[in-house]
Image (spheres, rainbow, N blue to C red):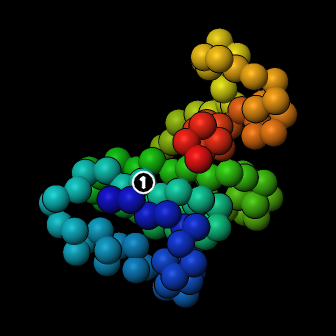
Amino acid sequence: MLLNLLDPVLEERLARNPKLLIEMINAAGKSINHVFIDEIQKIPKLLDLVHLLIETTSLKFILAGSSARKLKYGGANLLAGRAFVYNLYPLSVFELNNLSLKQVLEWGLLLAIFWKSLHK
């Protein structure tokens, strides 16, 4: 299951009713075993529900966000002892073929941005 909180409709629905996350997972039934939530920092309250689901189900969660500041300083549940933290860094020059300085200066080295610049 993929939940992208950049979708304003989904973000608004979950912000108004975080328990909707549990309802959505229950509605999917046994057809899912992984839940990916992108931009989790937009709704820190969801972390409490993720914690509950980690403790009560066999689901695996992948939580991604572009900024941890809101979570760290907002008193959010950081899932201590229940989560691994992986930092994704920009691409390096060794990971790119035909790297041009102009492209790097124009688009940066974040994978999504660089990918879009190559395929526009």
Nearest the viewer among 108 and 50 is 108
Residue 81 in view, yes or no? no
Which residue lies most toward the left here? 30
The residue singled out by tag 1 in the image is: 36
Q: Count the labels in the image.
A: 1
Q: Is residue 110 above or below residue 30?
A: above
Is residue 100 shown left or right of residue 83?
right
* Mark 1 element type: strand
Q: Compared with residue 46, is residue 69 higher up or lower down, i.e. above or below?
A: above
Residue at 71 percent across and 58 percent down: it is: 71
Q: Is residue 71 left or right of residue 56?
A: right
Alpha-carbon neighbours of circle 1 within 10 Å: few (<14), some, or many (≥20)?
some
Taking 100 as reference, is 116 left or right? Answer: left
Q: Quadrant of the N terminus?
A: bottom left
**What percent of the width, then of the height, locates residue 115?**
58, 38
* Residue at the (65%, 17%) spot, across then down: 98
Q: Quadrant of residue 106?
A: top right
| Front residue (pair 99, 38) | 99
Q: Is residue 117 above or below residue 36?
A: above
Residue 54 image offset from top left, x and y in percent: 38, 54
**Residue 111 percent coordinates (x, y):** 61, 36
Whether residue 20 is visible here, answered yes or no, is yes
Residue 72 image position (x, y, % from top left)? 75, 54
Position of 106 compared to 22: left or right? right
- Rendered position, 119 above or below 90: below
User: Which residue appears at 40% of the width and 80% of the height?
Assistant: 20
Q: Residue furthest top?
A: 94
What type is the residue that disc 1 sits on? Answer: Phe
Q: Residue furthest front?
A: 120
- Identified at 70% across, 20% down, the residue is 99
